[in-house]
Amino acid sequence: MHVPDGFVSPRISLPALAACAPLWAWAARRHLGHASVESLPVVGTLTALAFVIQTLVIPVPGGTSTHLVGVMLLALLFHPLLAFLCESLVLLVQALFFGAGGVTVLGVNALAMGLLGPLAGWLAWKALRRPSEKVALFAAGWLSTQVSTAAVLGALLLQHRLDPGYLPTPPAVLVTAMGVPSLAVTGVVEGLYTVFALSLVRKARLRGVDD
Amino acid sequence: MSPRALLLAVLLAAPGLAPAHETLHEIERGRAIGVKVYEVGEVMAGAPYQVFSPADPRIPWQEGRTDRGGWLAFVPDVPGSWRVKVIDDTGHGIDLRVEAGGVPAAPAPAGSGAAFLLRPLLGLAVIGAVFAALYVTYRRKGTRA
């Protein structure tokens, strides 16, 4: 799902980084500090878990593959802004140690996978949790994947529109290659993972996590 | 197994089990064979070409277009007589045989072995260190206050 380095030009990557900078500062000020000491071990563990989840590749017919994001748990247990901060750290580590994504596209990927997806999932969970908690959790996981994918796709399509020479892949190929796996596979697995993992975390009654 | 133990087991086992979602590369010099094609003294730039391996003379091993300098290059994986066909849009071209000698054994692909397993663990260690540092810092500040 990551936008790799070099796939979008500075016309997109720089504004994205500029948008992220104040959000990172705001998120750190709001969610990291003395008041958060109790929850930091859980937040750190769930961030590490998200990192692991993103290394698990799900093969998709057609020779491609997809992966979960896994930070929806942080958005649901704490706040979407904290999920954004933690996913940004995961993306930075992936860029530095794996060559997945990249430092120049960190802003684009962080906004797509760290902010917009978890925020959409969190809003869906808020809206649906009264009728059914499990359905709300599944919807949160599924929707977060679709919104993250749509945001990444939007950045790539915008790049193609701005300068097809920079990203020559035709829009139809981009939409098919990203949209179909996301709708059919990744979203469903992310939804199931969210339901399963959140129930485990709640059962564990971890310190720093509100019931 | 308790939920905590299950979480811990997944966390520790998964990086070793899974291939990372990454794209790697390696640079090796001196293995490729380059062919430069001319037509009446002019280089054939941007001309379509096909390369056939001696192991399968029917299905092209490689297809593409020559570069601006009229060059094409391929990396033989078996020794023998490789067929190179270059035919431009007007139907002119060349069909030649290129002998490839002893092909060195392919090196282990990048990302294999212990380093491949260590990098995810290194990533986990970095994340753990960041949160441990935050925890210790804020805890100390809280004790002093």
Image (cartoon, rainbow, N blue to C red):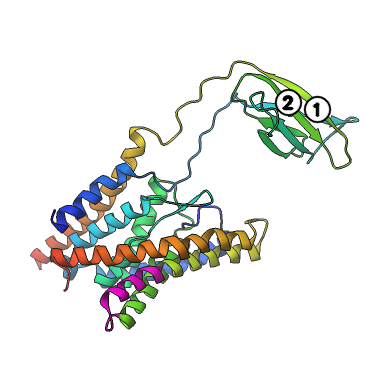
Can you say whether A146 is above or below B24 in the image? below
The answer to which image quadrant residue B122 occupies is top left
Q: Quadrant of the C terminus of chain A?
A: bottom left
The answer to which image quadrant residue A41 occupies is bottom left
Say which residue appears at 45% left-offset and 68% top-offset: A146
As rendered, which of B59 and B28 lies closer to the eye? B59
Say which residue appears at 46% left-offset and 63% top-offset: A184
Mark identifier at residue B95: 1
N-terminal of the pair, mark 2 or mark 1, is 2
> Can the viewer see residue A47 in this picture?
yes
Magenta highlight range: A129-144
As rendered, which of B11 and B137 lies closer to the eye? B11
**Callout 1: few (<14), some (14-19), or many (20+) C-alpha neighbours within 10 Å?**
few
Q: Are marks 2 and 1 in contact (CB under 8 Å)?
A: yes
Say which residue appears at 69% left-offset and 34% top-offset: B60
User: The disc labelled 1 sits on which kind of residue?
Assistant: Asp
User: Which residue is disc 2 drawn over?
Assistant: B83
User: The disc labelled 2 sits on which kind of residue?
Assistant: Arg
Q: Main secondary structure of the magenta part?
A: helix
Read off the chain for label 2.
Answer: B
Can you say whether A172 is above or below B53 in the image? below
Can you say whether A57 is above or below B70 in the image? below
As rendered, which of A33 and A127 lies closer to the eye? A127
Position of residue A37 in the picture relative to residue A5 (left or right): left
Mark identifier at residue A187: none
